[in-house]
Amino acid sequence: MSAAGETAAGRRPAIRAMTDRDVEAVVAVWAASGVARPWNDPARDIAFARRDPHSTVLVAEADGQVVATAMVGEDGHRGWVYYVAVDPDRQGEGFGHDVMAAAEAWLAARGVWKVQLLIREDNVGVRRFYESLGYRDMRTVCMQKVIG
Ligand SMILES: CC(C)(COP(=O)(O)OP(=O)(O)OC[C@H]1O[C@@H](n2cnc3c(N)ncnc32)[C@H](O)[C@@H]1OP(=O)(O)O)[C@@H](O)C(=O)NCCC(=O)NCCS
């Protein structure tokens, strides 16, 4: 772990569930890191993830700033992680690993034993990041339909 990835106090960042005060910073990290999409309203996604105890948005804070996020939740069968994002100015410092470890711990604390995530087809490079964390391509196709 690089020293640059440590907080000013020399420790790994505190990771916590976001609060209402973090919404702007979270949306900014999503926009800057490229995980935001025009057809997904980030404020709506945040509010929906935080509406009940089955999901939340975790944030990593360093030097007083939100630097990384992961939306995490369980659907009664598997754990899911979305919006894994690190401020581009702070990428490569270990925050991605930190926030993924926190998401897995959040799920494990709720008894979830498998976690999965989606990678857009054109986001080729990021596969190595997840593989380094033990994730494997399950060779499945995700199909989706808007129902509301
Ligand atoms: C993917 C992401 C969350 C990783 O966070 P990070 O803080 O930069 O990652 P870490 O510092 O914890 O880990 C870095 C490791 O991941 C690898 N890695 C991270 N992103 C990568 C990418 N896009 N392509 C290739 N390797 C990548 C690095 O090579 C590095 O490997 P090493 O430790 O062997 O050198 C971050 O780069 C990001 O926000 N990317 C843009 C948004 C995105 O694509 N999110 C994932 C959506 S599925």
Image (spheres, rainbow, N blue to C red):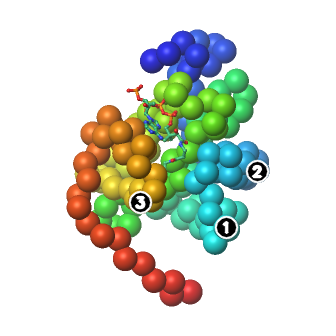
Residue at point 65%, 27% (across, down): 62
If you read the primary sequence from the N terminus, does the residue marked by circle 2 or circle 1 appear first?
A: 2
Kindly identify which residue carries mark 3.
Answer: 121
How far apart marks 2 and 1 lie (CA) works out to: 16 Å
Q: Residue furthest bottom?
A: 147
Q: Residue 82's x, y, as percent?
A: 48, 56
Q: What is the quadrant of residue 61 in the picture?
A: top right
If you read the primary sequence from the N terminus, does the residue marked by circle 3 or circle 2 appear first?
A: 2
Left-right relation of 113 to 37:
left
Between 63 and 15, the one lying in front of the other is: 63
If you read the primary sequence from the N terminus, does the residue marked by circle 1 or circle 3 appear first?
A: 1
Residue at point 32%, 53% (across, down): 115
Q: Are marks 2 and 1 in contact (CB under 8 Å)?
A: no
Left-right relation of 74 to 26:
left
Specify the label residue 38 is tagged with. Answer: 1
Q: Regarding mark 3 in the picture, which secondary structure is present there?
A: loop
Residue at point 41%, 49% (across, down): 124
Q: Are marks 1 and 3 in contact (CB under 8 Å)?
A: no
User: Would you place residue 52 above or below residue 28 in this image?
Assistant: below
